[in-house]
Image: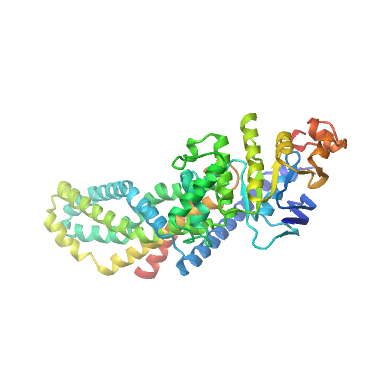
Amino acid sequence: MSISVRNLTKTFNDKKVLDNISFSVENGHTLGVVGFSGSGKSTLLKIISGLLYSDSGTIITENNSDIAMTFQYSALFDFLDVYHNIAFPLLERREFRGKYSKKEIKNIVKEKLALVGLEGIEEKFPSELSGGMQKRVGFARAIVTNPNIILYDEPTAGLDPVSSTLIENYIVRLKNELNAACIVVTHQMSTITRACDDVILLYEGKIVYRGTVNDFVSANTPYTKQFIEANIDGPMEIKSLT
Amino acid sequence: MINVKSTLTYSFFKLFFHCIKDFLITIGNIGKDFSRVLYYVVRLRINASATIEQSSRFAVDSLPITLTIVGMTSVIIAMQIAPELAKQGAEGYMGMMSALVMIRELSCIMSGFAIISMIGSSFASELASMAVGEQISAMHVLKVDPVEYLVVPRVLSGILTMPFVFIVSSLVGLVCTCLVSYMTAGLSPLNFMTSLWQGLYLRDILIAMLKASFFGGTIALISCSCGYSTRGGAKEVGESTTKAVVWSFVAIAVWDYIFAVLFYL
């Protein structure tokens, strides 16, 4: 077990956003978290990454686990170039300060950029990169400390289908290279089928389906059917449309 | 049956309590950020290169606008006072009066206003954009404290460089006053300088430098805190910047009053 979430509950203004959520992800596995907007997916990631506190429940990780997260809009530091964005944790995080020489950091950055297929862009600024490239730089920054848990928040949002496929391939590649436990929050079926091993479907803060990707695609439950077929009608009421 | 929620009284009290709540939240955020800045400063966890970079921005980048504002204010005051003093035969007091006004009050407060509008607003909008663009969240996830990385260097730059801005702007203000006194009242620069020494006290200069330091630190802290605590989107970035400017203006007015009471009452 690399990460185990048990009985997680979160309430905002008397509305339960997460209601008793439990799951676990093994090393070298990717869990897809899907659901319509407002179902609590991003809140779940924020709690796991430590950006939000849960009202109750526990998150159990292995000793010395390092959790990395990539953001929907990359969240690259726009005042730093690509090199300093990726090297940021090594230069500024207390436990790494002074641990690596300049040459070592340079090599690490180069190696991580190569892993996401972006060599030679160290001196560019985020504003000079395309959306897909920014996402990949965000991936490189997230994995620079070799984390064993990686969280992806909408990794393919706003990208064209080809760029999405590329990003999905990198998610698989990073999982294999680092043997990390990954959690991917997404709306896109292609991301689930290409990059994930297991899936949970959230609705109103509850898990309404869990299983492998193959089972999810072929499952004939009202919830999975509505999500896969993108039906407005079904057991899941889409609050943003009503 | 009257719908209470549609009455003017209800709207007034709703707005009133919203303002009170907003005031308390802002005070709380500033206090919290101040305690964290203090925590890092006491432990000497200071990023020297970032502090130097921010200091250059705080003092050097703001200097043209600060000097323009202080210079123009001095010119306007001298234009109106020097001829009047000359009419009363009291032009010999012009230098002394200018020194007292410039050192004790004008230079510090005008520099403060200039820095709020130029640097304070820029600190606030910069941090607010980072907050709404999830860059601050990214720092948290990367286990780098944004207060240590972003706020501490800015607050220190304000504390350390504002006295320098005050010295330079005072000099420029006095030179402008001297020139305008000569042009409008025929007061020779030599007489102005002789009179100036009578109103120039080391104690006043030291108090004003300390006051400038407080102004600088307060402007930076409030601006960073308002920016850092922003949630939402573009509208909230604008609101935070406005809030930072208004709060900084009020804060330095309060500091000015406290210093006047403590040292000159």
Q: Nearer the viewer, residue A103 or B95?
A: A103
Residue A196, position as x, y percentages in the image: 73, 42
* Quadrant including the C terminus of chain B: bottom left
Viewer can see residue B231: yes
Looking at the rendered structure, the number of numbered marks drawn on it comes to 0
Q: How is the image coloured?
A: rainbow
Vertical comparison of A227 with B203: above or below: above
Residue B4, position as x, y percentages in the image: 74, 45
Vertical comparison of A228 with A7: above or below: above
A34 vs A69, left or right, is right
Q: Nearer the viewer, residue B78 or B61?
A: B61
Residue at 19% from the left image edge and 61% from the top image edge: B196
Viewer can see residue B215: no
B225 vs B64, left or right, is right
Q: Nearer the viewer, residue B224 or A194?
A: A194
A128 vs B82, left or right, is right
* Quadrant including the N terminus of chain B: top right
Residue A25, position as x, y percentages in the image: 74, 51
Residue B51, position as x, y percentages in the image: 40, 57
Residue at 33% from the left image edge and 60% from the top image edge: B163
